Amino acid sequence: MKNTMLILILSFAYFVAYSQKGGVENEPYSTTSSKPFPSGKDVYGIFEGRGACQELAAVLKREVSADCYKTKWSLYLYQNPDTQAPATYVLEGSFYRQAIRKGNWRMTKGTKSDPDDIVFELEADNQQTIYLMKGDDNVLFFLDNDKNILTGNEHFNYTLNRVQKKLVE
């Protein structure tokens, strides 16, 4: 009994000493681009990611071919430079190649699982609202229309990560 208790205590001490420490935020990753990108006080952030095509198409009520496997996203969120209030956005991606999606965004609270979660709502004329949950300052998670988090599959997740772009000349 003493040996079992000693093993449990030592195991617990090991996991506490070598586990991830709380409070460490994700850092934006650097990416390069051959085209100009926005910067300045009116830019809230630039986010990019890839996700499974069929599932996001269903949430966004978009028709896609049966062989659509993945989607690529670039989201530019703009804010009022004086008040930092949400303003407009530009969404480029697989579903918006012919016409880049533009509209207004706002921050609200509440997902299906937590009424305190911060949710970004991206609205555009005559298009399905896109809901993104703020994980932290550098990560956004796609939500379905009932504000449930989309969990992904064995190949893709439904996250957008903040990026810091560098221009390639």
Image: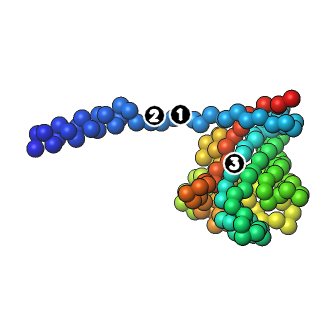
C-alpha gap between disc 1 and disc 3: 21 Å
In the rendered image, the quadrant that contains the C terminus is: top right
In the rendered structure, which disc, 1 or 3, sits on the residue that comes first in sequence?
Answer: 1
Measuring 87% from the left and 38% from the top, which residue is drawn there?
35
Neighbours of disc 2 within 10 Å: few (<14), some (14-19), many (20+): few
Mark 1 touching mark 3, by CB under 8 A?
Answer: no
Relative horizontal placement of residue 101, taking residue 12 as reference (left or right): right
Q: Nearer the viewer, residue 45 or 121?
A: 45
Residue furthest out toward the top = 169
**Dot 2: element:** loop
Residue at label 3?
49
Location of mark 1 (residue):
24
Mark closest to the chain's N terminus, 2 or 3: 2
Q: Which residue is mark 2?
A: 21
Task: Identify the element where label 3 is drawn.
Answer: strand
Viewer-side residue, 44 vs 163: 163
Task: Please rate how many residues cluster around mark 1, counting C-alpha atoms within 10 Å: few if below 14, some from 14 to 19, many from 20.
Answer: few
**Can residue 119 be seen in the rendering of this structure?**
no
Q: Nearer the viewer, residue 56 or 140?
A: 56
C-beta proximity under 8 Å, tags 2 and 1: yes
One can see residue 112 in this view: yes
C-alpha span from label 2 to label 3:
26 Å
Amino acid type shown at disc 1: Val
Q: Is residue 8 left or right of residue 93?
A: left
